[in-house]
Each structure stands twice: as structure tokens, then as C-alpha cells.
Image (cartoon, rainbow, N blue to C red):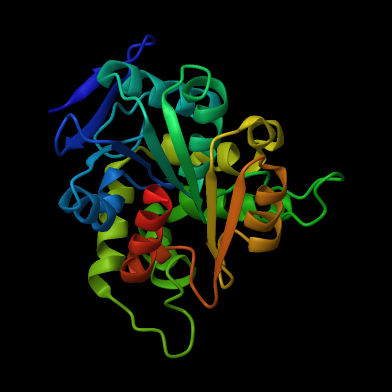
Amino acid sequence: MSAITTQDGVDIFYKDWGPKTAQPIVFHHGWPLSSDDWDAQMLYFVAKGYRVIAHDRRGHGRSSQVSEGHDMDHYAADAAAVMERLDLRNAVHIGHSTGGGEVARYVARYGQPQGRVAKAVLVSAVPPLMLKTDSNPGGLPMEVFDGIRSALADNRAQFFLDFAGGPFYGFNRPGAKVSQGVIENWWRQGMTGSAKAHYEGIKAFSETDQTEDLKSIEVPTLVMQGDDDQVVPIDDAARLAVKLLKNGTLKVYPGFPHGMLTTHADVINPDLLAFIQG
């Protein structure tokens, strides 16, 4: 198994496909999934000649189910450990949902200062801040995240089926083309991970204010989101994030759901390629 061990003793699993001399594209997955959620993108880009890398966040997928460190600082440090071990440079970092928060913090704290990052992409991403506060009135109330915590603690397996079968992919919308395989693959990835990591990760993705991370990012950054995202509201996410970025571009997809990387890979992948090559 390909893995690195962090300074605090966590084994982080990763995939590394394609020519080692090619430009690297690094994928950062969402909660509560694993690097397997990037299959449609990794196969597409490796076929285009790129080197593609994705890792399982601590407590997720095949990485160590450790007790501590389920916060954005550790997520970014773990990503940095993988990038440094593989000595990746001129990399494009693409993050989905919570992985978008991980990308923002990694690029701001590690990748950009180390000169390792060429471009970044935030897809349906959580920054700048999901939680409703006095300074973020458009956010979601704490009750929403407490509800997610309760559902996970009460019956994680059923909650994951319901979440994947409903709002994540927009399968609860009238006329939606539901894929049972997609639902079960989401469930499989989630149930492989640690319940504690998932429970504590809710605080990480909902309460981490990444305003300063976004402000400090100077590399070209593409912000992509569907306007029917039922998980991360677009008005408090992509539309705010792009205003904070020094070199950001916003692309909105009418009617697309939170999990559009899977349901609409045929549209998203060529757009990612155009940005990377642009």
C-alpha cells in the first residue's frame, strides 16, 4: 500500500498514477469520502498524460483511524506531508467540498510559500465559512450541523444512504436520474472511514473561517459550483469565495448538485482541463 507517515505518526494512503515527469494534478476529497471519489477525474486526466495524485484524509478511507487531529490545520499539514514526500511542483490542486477547504489552507500555508502550486480549483467548496455568525449572516445555523451530528451518531449507515440518495447528488429532485451504484459507492467510501473522524470533521468543515486563506492565495484559482447545491449554499460559498481571491474566476452551473463531479463529469472534466491548460 502506498502511504506516508506524518510527524505525529498517522499513515496517509495515497494514489499516484501516470508519468512521474508529467505535471501533477492533486485531488482532495470531500466529507466523509475517500480518494475513490475522484475516479472519474483521475482516469480522465491520466489518459490526457497528466500525473494524478489523491490521498485519503486522516480517519477516512484507508488512512489511519486515529483519535485526534480532525481539523483543517491537520488536514492541510497531512496533505503537505504527501506533497513533500513526492516532491510535487508546478501542481494543480483541486478540492471538492471539505477538500476545497483543505486546498485553500494547504495552498495558503504550505504550497504557495514552498513554490509548489501552479493553480487551484475549489469545487462546491466550503470556504469561506459555512456557519451562520454575526459576520457571516448568510451561513447555515448551528442546528443544521447539530442535526448532521445526531444523524451520524444515531445510525451512520442509514444516514449515509439517505444523504447520498437525496441532497448530495440531487437525487431527491423531480425527474432526477438516480444511480444506485453511485449511492452505494458513496456509502462504501463513507463506511470505510472512522465514525469519530466523520463526527469531528463536521466541526472542521462548518466552523473553520477561511477568509484569510482565500485572501492570501495568489495563484490562478477557479471556483466552480452548481446553483442547485443543497449541501453547501452557493451564495455563502462560491460567490463569496471568488470575491476574496486575488486571481479568482467563478463558473456557475445551472441546476447542478453538490456532487456534480460525479453526476456531470462529462461537463466538469473538460472545463477543468481548459483551466489547467489555459
Residue 19: image location, x then y, percent: 14, 35
* Whether residue 18 is visible: yes
- Name which residue lies at 71% across and 37% down: 211
Which residue occupies the extreme front position in the image? 278
Side of 265 where 181 appears, left or right: left
Residue nearer the viewer, 186 or 277: 277
Q: In this view, does 145 lie above or below 118?
A: below
Residue nearer the viewer, 6 or 255: 255
- Name which residue lies at 49% across and 63% down: 258
Which residue occupies the extreme top position in the image? 7
* Whether residue 130 is visible: no
Q: Is residue 77 above or below residue 239?
A: above
Which residue occupies the extreme right position in the image? 134
Residue 12: image location, x then y, percent: 29, 25
Residue nearer the viewer, 88 or 170: 88
Q: In this view, does 85 lie above or below 260?
A: above
Instruction: Choose top left, top right, bottom left or bottom right for residue 73.
Output: top right
Side of 86 where 109 appears, left or right: right
- Considering the image in quadrants, where does the N terminus appear? top left
Instruction: Choose top left, top right, bottom left or bottom right for residue 78.
Output: top left
Instruction: Choose top left, top right, bottom left or bottom right for residue 85.
Output: top left
Side of 213 where 104 appears, left or right: left
Residue 198: image location, x then y, percent: 44, 41
Q: Is residue 23 above or below residue 182?
A: above
- Name which residue lies at 33% across and 28% down: 65
Residue 196: image location, x then y, percent: 43, 35
Q: How many marks?
A: 0
